[in-house]
Image (cartoon, rainbow, N blue to C red):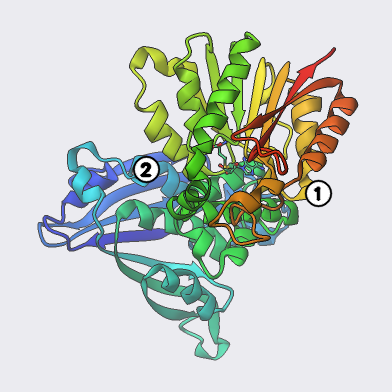
Amino acid sequence: MLLTISTTHQPATDLGYLLFKHPDKCQEFNLSFGTARVFYPEASDTKCTAALVLDINPVDLARGKAGAKRQTLEAYVSDRPYAASSFLSVAISQVFRTAMTGRCEQKQAVADTPIPLVVKIPVLPSRGREGFLRGLFEPLGYDVSVRRLALDETFPDWGNSSYFDVELSHTIKLCDLLSHLHVMIPVLDDDKHYYVNEDEIEKLLRHGEGWLSTHPLKEEITSRYLKRQRGLTRDALAQIAVEEVIEETSDLETQEEIIEKPISLNQQRMETVVAALKANGVQKIVDLGCGEGKLLKLLLKEPTFQEILGMDVTYKSLEFAQERVLDKLPTHQKGRLQLIQGSLNYRDARITGYDAATVIEVIEHMELDRLIAFERVLFEFAKPKIAIVTTPNVEYNVKFENLPTGKLRHPDHRFEWTRVEFKTWAQSVGDRYKYSLEFSSIGDVDPVVGSPTQMAMFIATV
Ligand code: SAH
């Protein structure tokens, strides 16, 4: 299995820095399924090519050493040693792990710059479909050149195989190119060699960040990447949809902020929540759906809050939180805050054992029929002593001059509740899971329509 990456960016040998592999050396890496070697067939100032060669032994595979279960003779004669497959994808992520992060202390400016890159993959399977292969890469800006390989060149009558000799050219950051390959190779091969579970969603979201949510074939890519497991695919697509909204985040956030601005609602909301937490003497807090970390930042200012965990389903938001909050903390404070990616619709051991959970302006982003799962995750399994939930009061929307009648405050809101609807919901959850309730209004209170934000504090009674 062979893959080469070339550049004519000058000096071309910068490629060695970006890949963290010296052009003068041939390096060998032992992976669980075989051996990967990286070397440079050419390395001059004007052109540099890195080759990744992966040797896997089909006999080991067939004997089950690396996962295959088939016991027939056929298993010993497979395309796995020759065709680019999920093995190559895993090799890329292991051998070029640091390069994929986009970090390169010695040449950060080059790592951050789109440079001319050409990738050659001599045997890439695509089940006979050239259109699909093009459909994956062309929307990302690649020039795709393909040559369909004959089944056997000595017997032209046998016709074509489903393998292609492929060349992809683009002026692009190396880390983006590696992410594209890492996702697309197994998508094309459609036969992952390892077990696919929820972890793969996280990987897909991480490597697909910034491009997958807007890719015209995102459904097909997601489904194939997750080995066509319907449940996983549905969850991944839901998360990608959230990301799509967040990607336009500055626009949309400001849109919601502009609407709410005259009363600086966000600030009042955060301050009310912090005051409630302090009044209840909590020390360990988990902020669920923490977004870009606005609340986390305020929580960190209070030394009584010793352990703070931020969780969000959207990787992009967590990156913002990392940059704007975590990275800015002095070293001795960093231990107080942890950020994790996770969904509130899944039971998650990482969010148990906290004194308090905050769920600020999050529930309205969930489909109503997913709320039941969220209720169980938070109140049946995570079971904080206190939970604070805030959500818009839809009755107040008439007071926002720049919000058209009947429209919700944010395009991603699935619903917005009246005061009665929110109280009814909270009360029934409280009854079910043994929590008592205190309700508050956040923002200016209008005698007719109430306040813009409504808050419920759930206090465990057992
Ligand atoms: N609490 C933050 C962000 C509110 S925006 C604040 O007040 O500023 C809503 C956030 O909820 C987004 O960051 C979104 O990614 C997150 N979210 C939506 N559905 C979620 C789910 N099912 N699990 C975890 N987070 C979710």
Residue 275 falls left or right of residue 383: left
Which quarter of the image is occupied by the C terminus? Answer: top right
Seen as rendered, the residue at the extreme bottom is: 157
**SS of the residue at dot 1?**
helix
**Mark 2 vs mark 1, CA separation in Å:** 37 Å
Ligand 1 has an atom within 8 Å of the beta carbon of the residue at disc 1:
no
Q: Is residue 90 above or below residue 282?
A: below
Q: Position of residue 229 (x, y in %)?
A: 72, 55
**SS of the residue at dot 2?**
helix
Residue visible at 25% across and 48% down in the picture: 111
Residue 137 falls left or right of residue 386: left
Q: Residues within 10 Å of mark 2 (few under 14, many from 20)?
A: some
Q: Nearer the viewer, residue 146 or 400?
A: 400
Instruction: Tell me where residue 94 sits by quadrant.
Output: top left
Q: Quadrant of ligand 1?
A: top right
Is any part of residue 81 visible from this angle? Answer: no
Contact between marks 2 and 1 (CB within 8 A): the answer is: no
Which quarter of the image is occupied by the N terminus? Answer: bottom left
Residue 219 falls left or right of residue 173: right
Q: Position of residue 31 (x, y in %)?
A: 47, 40
Q: Position of residue 270 (x, y in %)?
A: 54, 28
Q: Is residue 238 above or below residue 382?
A: below
At label 1, the amino acid type is: Asp
Which sits earlier in the primary sequence, circle 2 or circle 1? 2
Q: Is residue 369 above or below residue 145?
A: above
Is any part of residue 258 visible from this angle? Answer: yes
Q: Which residue is mark 2?
A: 101
Q: Nearer the viewer, residue 85 or 73?
A: 85
At label 2, the amino acid type is: Thr
Residue 369's disc number: 1
Residue visible at 50% across and 56% down in the picture: 183
Residue visible at 30% across and 59% down in the picture: 5
